[in-house]
Image: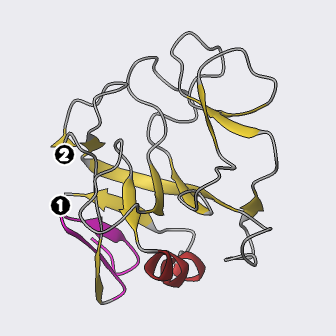
Amino acid sequence: MRQTDLVVMPTHLRFRGRRLPCTIGRGGLTDHKHEGDGATPRGVHRIVGMLYRPDRMGRPADWALPIRPGDLWSDDVRDPDYNMMVRVPHAFGHEDLRRADPMYDLVILTDWNWPYPVKGRGSAIFIHQWRGKGRPTAGCVALSLPDLRWIAPRIMHNTRLVIA
């Protein structure tokens, strides 16, 4: 592992010499991820993007892209665009990236089952804001907003999410 890696344990994330509290999926850690299991997949995942709400914060890194009204993420295995960012109107199941709550105000994207998704293997594993310390996610990794904002500008082209 490298100092530039985001290393996740069940209760914390290590990055650049810091240990930050985090939460993982309600299904715990898994080596056999599938859609809807609520688990966080073990492994080494590349960081492939960053999204943010420009109406709620400034650009967290120069390569971050704004979340616009109508931006969605497909999580429906029947969708030809499964596990991809899509736009409204969208006839298949999806998550709204521009949520009323602050959970997706800053989202770091990983390459889990992307860019060539295997249907049913599980949709996006994001790093996003938590609902509260100790409150699990649907499979993503979540941190407090201050910690997430500290991490965002320090991510480099070779930063990976390592889930032990």
- Residue 7 picture location, percent across and down: 28, 68
Secondary structure of residue under mark 2: strand
Q: Residue 94's mark?
A: none
* Coloration mode: secondary structure
Q: In this view of the protein, which residue sits in the foreground, 116 or 11? A: 11
In screen coordinates, is 146 left or right of 41? right
* Residue on which the image places disc 2: 29
Please name the amino acid that badge 1 sits on: Pro
Badge 2: residue crowd in 10 Å (few <14, some 14–19, many ≥20): many
- Residue 42 picture location, percent across and down: 24, 47
Secondary structure of residue under mark 1: loop
Q: What stretch is highlighted in magenta?
A: 1-16
Q: Do the residues labelled 1 and 2 touch (CB within 8 Å)?
A: yes
Task: Check if residue 10 falls in the magenta segment.
Answer: yes
Q: What quarter of the picture does the C terminus occupy?
A: bottom left
Please name the amino acid that badge 2 sits on: Leu
Q: What quarter of the picture does the N terminus occupy?
A: bottom left
* Residue on which the image places disc 1: 10
Q: In the image, is residue 91 above or below residue 47?
A: above
Task: Check if residue 13 falls in the magenta segment.
Answer: yes
